[in-house]
Image (tube, rainbow, N blue to C red):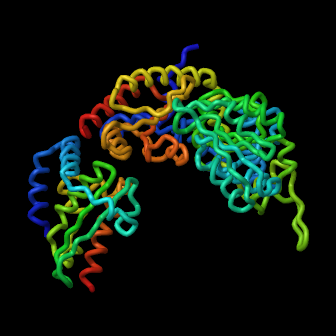
Amino acid sequence: MATEAFEELAETFEFLDDWEDRYRHVIDMGKAFPPLDDAVKVPATKVDGCASQVWILPRIEGQGPEAQFDFEGESDAMIVRGLIAVLHALYAGLSVKDVGAVDAPAELARLGLNDHLSAQRSNGLRAMVERIRKTAQEAATV
Amino acid sequence: MTYNIDAIRADFPILSREVNGKPLVYLDNGASAQKPKVVIDAITQAYSHEYANVHRGLHYLSNLATDKYEAVRGKVAQFLGVPDENEIVFTSGTTEAFNLVSYGWGAHNLKAGDEIILSVMEHHANIVPWHFLRERLGVKLVWVDCDTNGDLDPQAVIDAMTPRTRMIAITHLSNVLGTVVDVKSICEAARARGIVTCVDGSQAAVHMPVNVADLGCDFYAITGHKLYGPSGSGAIYMKRARMDEMQPFMGGGDMIRDVHRDTITWNDPPMKFEAGTPGIVQQIGLGVALDYMMGVGMEAIAAHETSLRDYARTRLDGLNWLNVQGKSATKAAIFSFTLEGAAHAHDISTVLDKKGVAVRAGHHCAQPLMDHMGVPATCRASFAMYNTTDEVDALVDALELCHDLFA
């Protein structure tokens, strides 16, 4: 179910055996991910449940279950910004219907990043995934 | 006598574990300290062989549990240099203690326009209960800033005293900056003006000898979980004269003498302020923790931590991309810092954690101080009696990796 971008990412991560290299890669992805316009950093886009500040701005093209899902996002923490970029690879370009079918913990486990979903709940990856799924689900049922 | 750090470390079972495949370097003592085996064993012993409710039954176990529990009052009094143990009230921690003072003393002795002085370094536990009085009674909160080094000039606090000042709520040791406040001078000036002093000893009592009689304050609160004791344990010293001015805070069992349909009479202090079944085993554990600290010696603990502070200060000062907040010469071994560049405090703590180094990241429940310093969040490495210079080195190594990753 994963996007091509995520499959590429998973391939890259296969060559990164220790956490330091994986983090370095995540951080680099965060640095390369375009920041959000300050004007859209508003309560509606803010994701609660994150220890650092996180904003997710959905971009949905089309109508109904086949509408195409995309989003912009930013965090004031660099690792979290990198995780947003990872989620972008995971979800961007899917139909809103397919967003709900992605098994995020399983996919992130392929990158060795799944511990962010359980133990370190405070970094907000779980909250971000929930926000993305909820937004897509709402769009699919309009 | 030399400080036997190896023997002390061996007393704390958790210190021998690994985290993320690395030896644990526990530098989050400011948030909560680890427990020595004697405390853990005391909890097991109490629940296994000596447990019943206190103050109520006349049976063997109730008397035994009551004796063990009540003996802790004397230990706390000894630990804080309080001559009369009936001036020690048990609490679940400092937060409950200050709420008790706010509801029990403040609500009945303050009125609109009265002023409470606070330092900008206060923990939320020593801020929010006073905000309640501001919201409900119209009491005015007057803030005194620390200087750029994090020092608090006692004269600045004295200068803030007006004829309307009724109370000073002040920390003895900043949980963020490590600053030690000259509480004695402040209390002396306050006493001369009839102003009540409420001191937060959450951090200070862990790191240095405290003598409440010498400080001359009206209230002094400590929290057990930072003192190597169980969470949910704690106590507050309350001067007898203040107790006499107080109403009970929480109502229930233990704090009453008689309850009838139309009347109630209170138990005598300290019981008057201890409603319901208390944290029996927690307080028993606290007593053991205080015995443990006094056995090592507070002077010896303070000397060890001072040498750790000096070593850590030298090592951290060598990192020219690290900003340490709090430069007070006499500070405790508590270091808050940020990294130059874009790395967030949470980024740093995440990477440190991967190296087995536990620190706190965030606003440390001291948002007015963070506003004053102009930083949204910092990382904080806070040392304790069992930390070593090797662990300072481990922190610095992990910070160098952060610098490399986020640069």
Q: Is residue B236 left or right of residue A68?
A: right
Quadrant including the C terminus of chain B: top left
- B72 vs B103: above or below: above
Q: Quadrant of the N terminus of chain B?
A: top right
The residue sitting at 64% across, 44% down in the picture is: B143
Foreground residue among A36 and B267: A36
Q: Is residue B136 visible?
A: yes
Q: How many marks?
A: 0
Give the residue displayed 69% in from the left and 30% down from the top. Answer: B155
Where does residue A59 sit, x and y in percent of width and height? Answer: 22, 71
Above or below: residue A75 compared with residue B336 = below
Residue sitting farthest toward the top: B1
Residue B126, position as x, y percentages in the image: 64, 47
Q: Position of residue B64 (x, y in %)?
A: 75, 46
Residue B285: tell me if it is visible: no
Left or right of B45 on screen, residue B377: left
Q: Quadrant of residue B200?
A: top right
Q: Quadrant of residue B329?
A: top right
Q: Is residue B145 left or right of residue B195?
A: left
Is B118 on the left-hand or right-hand side of B189? Answer: left
Residue A41 at x, y percent in the picture: 34, 62
